[in-house]
Amino acid sequence: MLEKTGVPTPEDLAKVSPSKERLSQGPVAIIECFQRIPCDPCYAACKRGAIKKFSDINDLPEINFELCNGCAVCVSKCPGLAIFVVDQTYSEKEALVKIPYEFLPLPEKGEVVNALDRKGETVSTARVVDVIKFKDKTCVISMAVPKELSMDIRNIRARRE
């Protein structure tokens, strides 16, 4: 399915997702990289050693969720825009989701945007909590989303007229 639609299956996602217990402990990166290609900037970006060293540059990245603190540096370094941070401890009803974002104009803090799933379909709204601009030009958008959708929302669309 992934090869035809570009959308990972639930089975694909289960292989790369942290446990519910880990999600309940605070922010954690999730690497949704499913193609064996020569790429490893995420490994070099992670100063905590949470992203395991690659045996071969074509290996799929692996993350030790227990070492990850959700800092999001790897999110900005991934050229495939395949890394996200989910923090289900953000509030009682909302989770914080951090996504890579390379479009203009950038959303502004406090702005309400459409929250999109992996298919690009609107599934909710999200409130932009922060916009972090890294030196490499890939920004990281932090957004508050309904907690039950935190593992589904992976992009946004501005609601501007």
Image (tube, rainbow, N blue to C red):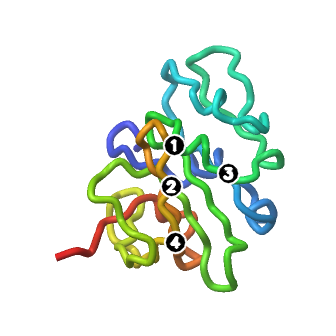
99 is higher (above) or lower (below) than 80: below
Marks 4 and 1, how far apart at CA = 17 Å
Q: In the image, what residue type sits under mark 3?
A: Cys
Would residue 54 appear left or right of 8 to someone viewing this image?
right
**Residue 83, position in %: x, y?**
55, 46
Marks 1 and 2, how far apart at CA = 9 Å
**Which of pointers 4 and 3 lies earlier in the amino acid sequence?**
3
Q: Secondary structure at mark 3?
A: loop
User: Which residue appears at 64% of the width and 14% of the height?
Assistant: 56
Marks 4 and 3, how far apart at CA = 15 Å
Q: In the image, what residue type sits under mark 2?
A: Ile
Q: Which of pointers 1 and 2 indicates the residue nearer the eye?
A: 2
**Which of pointers 2 and 3 lies earlier in the amino acid sequence?**
3
**Which of pointers 1 and 3 lies earlier in the amino acid sequence?**
3
Q: In the image, what residue type sits under mark 4?
A: Val
42 is higher (above) or lower (below) than 141: above
Q: How many marks?
A: 4
Kindly indicate the quadrant of the structure image that contains residue 54: top right
> According to the image, label 4 marks what residue?
129
User: Which residue appears at 82% of the width and 45% of the height?
Assistant: 67
Kindly indicate the quadrant of the structure image that contains residue 158: bottom left
Rendered-image quadrant of the N terminus: top left
User: Which residue appears at 63% of the width and 85% of the height?
Assistant: 93
Marks 1 and 3, how far apart at CA = 10 Å
> According to the image, label 2 marks what residue?
132
> According to the image, label 1 marks what residue?
76
> According to the image, label 3 marks what residue?
71
Marks 2 and 3, how far apart at CA = 11 Å
User: Which residue appears at 35% of the width and 48% of the height?
Assistant: 102
Say few, some or many: other residues with alpha carbon within 10 Å of mark 1 (under 14 / 14 to 19 / 20 or more). Answer: many
